[in-house]
Structures are given as C-alpha cells and as structure tokens.
Amino acid sequence: MTNDPNTTFIFLNGRIVNRIGYGAMRLTGQPRNFGPYADWQGGIDLLRRARDLGINHIDTARAYGPHENEKLIADALVDADGSYGEMFIASKGGVEKSATSLARDTSAETMKRHLEESLASLRTDKIDLYYVHAPDGITSISESVAAFEEMRQAGKIDMIGLSNVTRAQVEEALKVAPVAAVQNRYSPADERDEELEEMIDWLNEQGIAFVPHGPLGADPMKQGATVDPGEALRTLLARAPNILVIPGTTTIAHLEDNASVLAT
Ligand SMILES: NC(=O)c1ccc[n+]([C@@H]2O[C@H](COP(=O)([O-])OP(=O)(O)OC[C@H]3O[C@@H](n4cnc5c(N)ncnc54)[C@H](OP(=O)(O)O)[C@@H]3O)[C@@H](O)[C@H]2O)c1
C-alpha cells in the first residue's frame, strides 16, 4: 500500500492503513454485546464486504462476546494460507465480561493471559495492534504496558495501543514501550473536551494514531447513531491526519455509506 495522508495513515513501524476502518463490536449477541452474533453468516458477509471496499483496519476486543467477535473475524478474514493478508487487526485485553457484569483487570498476569486468548480466538500467531482496553485503576499503566512489551519482544504483537487513557498515562507508558495508537471516546456528538483536543494534537506530533470510539455518538449498549454519520466522519477525518475512524454498523448498506465518505 502507498501512503496518501488524506486517505491513509502510516504507523510508527511503517504499516499503512486506510483511515476509514470498521468497529466490529456490534457483531455480537444483544443486549450488552454479549454472546455470539445471532446472524453469524451475515457477520461474515459484512466483514468480507468491508475488505472488498478497501477497509483494512478492523477493531475488536477480547471482551466483545467475550471471544465471539474475534472468532467471527477469524471465520470471515483468515485466508486459505492461514493469514489475514493485507488486513490490519486491532484487539484489546483487560476487560472481563459476563452476561450481567463488566470488570477491569489490567495486571501483568491477566494482560498476558488475555493476549494469548485473543491469539487463539483470532487464529493467528501475531496481532497487529493490541490495546490495554481500559486501565483498572489499581494496576499502573507501566505494569500493563511492560507485560505487552514482553509479548511484543516475543513476536506476539506488532504494536501496543492504549484505550480510555489520559495523556499522563500515555506519557507514563512511553517510558516503558513505544505506543502506536490511543483509542478514546470522541465524537462530534460529544461535548467539547479541551484536554482531549490538546491530546489529539500532541499524539499527532508524536506520530501516534488517535482512534475515536463511538465516532457517530452511539451509546455502546444501544442501537443508533446520534449524529449524521457522513458529516461526523468527514469532520473527524478533517480534524487531524492521525485520526483513524472505526464506525460500527450491522448493515452492509451503512458500511458502504461509511466507506464512501473519503470519496465525497
Ligand atoms: N475502546 C472502547 O472502550 C470502546 C468502546 C465502545 C466502542 N469501541 C469501538 O468503537 C467502535 C464504534 O463504536 P460504536 O459501534 O459503539 O458506535 P458508533 O460507531 O458511534 O455508532 C454505531 C451506530 O451507528 C449506526 N450507524 C453506523 N453507520 C450508519 C450509517 N451510515 N447510517 C445510519 N446509521 C449508522 C449503527 O447502526 P446500524 O447497525 O443500523 O448501522 C450503530 O448503531 C466499536 O465497534 C468498537 O470497535 C471501543
């Protein structure tokens, strides 16, 4: 892939992705993104359509399902040669989910176990980008990131990401390992947050991707965008060249609309 800053982003390690990606969280059982997606074949078709449309950045997490969303992605996108080809898969560890509860655990031991489980569910030896899903408030970010750095050195992940973090936490993490991406809630639907605005610019200066979750203003546990999707995606992409969008959808029609944004 060649780089065009309007449509693509180059990660710190030289990997290039399209700036319009796909957030797969909603291809899970409902309510609460728990259990397997009811229309498994429909999910496969949607993910393959994303690939055909040139969307190569797919965002998932061990917690979605749990495991089920990663397994669906493997069923859809692992090629006959056992690889993901040109696709760029990002997942996350550190959140434990049941039908009724959600708990964070970002201790080194759990982070390593979650990563091994994600590798198994995604049926791969290496994940392109693996995030700390959300700091647990007890474990230091440097402990979680050191665990990932050990796994990165062992060749099990290519790059480390942080989700739901402050700039201070990113700075702490950077003392331990390179950070390639930050994923926080950010959408034109949300109230302006000056600290977050400054963080996006600072991340851009560092060459770190910013991946807004809930880019269309949706409640992660409820159905429906709260802003005009095309307008929101265009605003986000124009905001800074390090922004990679991952709108979620369960319909191929909406996927096609979202993928066409860069062309309009
Ligand atoms: N790191 C974290 O803590 C975290 C938290 C939440 C989410 N995420 C990630 O962020 C991704 C995106 O977030 P999200 O799915 O919660 O919210 P979102 O992208 O803001 O919005 C998704 C909602 O918008 C609708 N939609 C999408 N495209 C549309 C279109 N063109 N026209 C009309 N409606 C449209 C979808 O409904 P339809 O199905 O009907 O299209 C869906 O209900 C997730 O998939 C996940 O990967 C991460």
Image (cartoon, rainbow, N blue to C red):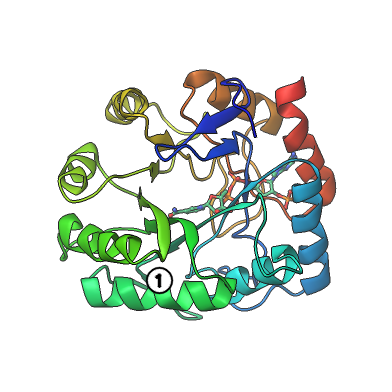
Query: Relative to residue 102, is residue 15 drawn left or right?
Result: right
Above/below status of 100 relative to 196: below
Q: Position of residue 16 (x, y in %)?
A: 55, 37
* Quarter that holds the C terminus: top right
Tell me which corner region of the image, top left, top right, bottom left or bottom right, holds residue 95. Answer: bottom left
Q: Position of residue 166 (x, y in %)?
A: 25, 42
- Asked if residue 260 can be seen in this view, the reply is yes
Above/below status of 187 relative to 60: above
Q: Position of residue 86 (x, y in %)?
A: 66, 49
For the point 33% across and 67% down, the residue is 154
Q: Position of residue 68 (x, y in %)?
A: 60, 75
* Quarter that holds the N terminus: top right
Which class describes the residues within 10 Å of circle 1: few (<14), some (14-19), or many (20+)?
A: many
Above/below status of 142 relative to 202: below
For the point 80% across and 52% down, the residue is 251
Q: Secondary structure at mark 1?
A: helix
